[in-house]
């Protein structure tokens, strides 16, 4: 956008296993993920889309996010994900995250997502996930 920075990522992967190999629902699946980030001085805005499928399911997820920079190099972010599984009614998930610079060399990352994953009974299952990470730079 004009002279502002942007970042694009495209990831494609393929699983080559079968349902006999694993209880993992993503067996023999193809996954495509694309995201676009727009970097501004006070915030980063992003949007993404992913598509996963195998012979038993098709999952499309649309993602919108906003990360606000606060207190110098700290940030708080939030976003929503619209999940469409096998063309049924879409389900909305959301998430929040933050990174807090504790010192020049230590950063604390925290995130929480109220999301959905495909289950073995061919429906979306609620999946709440939290993460706390401390990174030390040398």
Image (tube, helix red, strand yellow):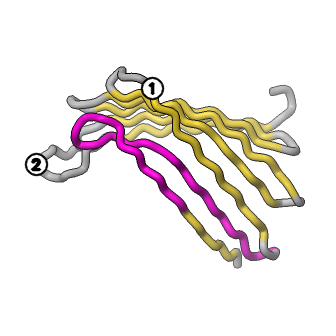
The percent coordinates of residue 138 (x first, y second) are 70, 78
Q: Nearer the viewer, mark 2 or mark 1?
A: 1
Q: Which mark is residue 98?
A: none
Q: Residue at x 59, y 67 (%)?
A: 132
Q: Residues within 10 Å of mark 1 (few under 14, many from 20)?
A: some
Q: Earlier in the sequence, mark 2 or mark 1?
A: 2
The answer to whether residue 8 is magenta is no
Number of numbered discs: 2
> Residue 126 falls in which quadrant of the image?
top left
Q: Which residues are magenta?
A: 104-130
The percent coordinates of residue 55 (x first, y second) are 21, 29
The percent coordinates of residue 92 (x first, y second) are 51, 33
Q: Do tag 2 and tag 1 residues touch (Cβ < 8 Å)? A: no
The answer to whether residue 119 is magenta is yes
Apparent side of residue 123 relative to residue 47 in the rendered image (left or right): left
Report if residue 7 is visible in the image.
no
> Residue 123 falls in which quadrant of the image?
top left
Q: Residues within 10 Å of mark 2 (few under 14, many from 20)?
A: few
- Of 67 and 13, nearer the camera is 67
Apparent side of residue 21 relative to residue 45 in the rendered image (left or right): left
- Of 113 and 53, nearer the camera is 113
Kind of element beneath mark 1 = loop
Q: Residue at x 38, y 36 (%)?
A: 31
Q: Residue at x 31, y 31 (%)?
A: 53
Q: Which mark is residue 90?
A: 1
Which residue is identified by label 2?
Answer: 20
Apparent side of residue 21 relative to residue 108 in the rendered image (left or right): left
Kind of element beneath mark 2 = loop
């Amino acid at each position: 956008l004009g002279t502002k920075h942007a970042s694009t990522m495209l990831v494609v992967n393929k699983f080559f296993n079968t349902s006999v190999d694993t209880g993992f629902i993503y067996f023999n699946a193809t996954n495509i993920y694309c995201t676009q980030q727009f970097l501004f001085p006070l915030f980063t805005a992003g949007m993404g889309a992913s598509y996963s499928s195998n012979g038993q399911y098709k999952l499309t997820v649309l993602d919108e996010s906003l990360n606000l920079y606060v207190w110098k190099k700290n940030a708080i972010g939030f976003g929503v994900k619209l999940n469409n599984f096998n063309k049924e009614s879409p389900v909305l998930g959301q998430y929040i995250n933050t990174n807090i610079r504790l010192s020049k060399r230590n950063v604390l990352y925290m995130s929480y997502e109220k999301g959905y994953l495909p289950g073995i009974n061919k429906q979306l299952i609620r999946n709440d996930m939290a993460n706390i990470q401390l990174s030390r730079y040398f």
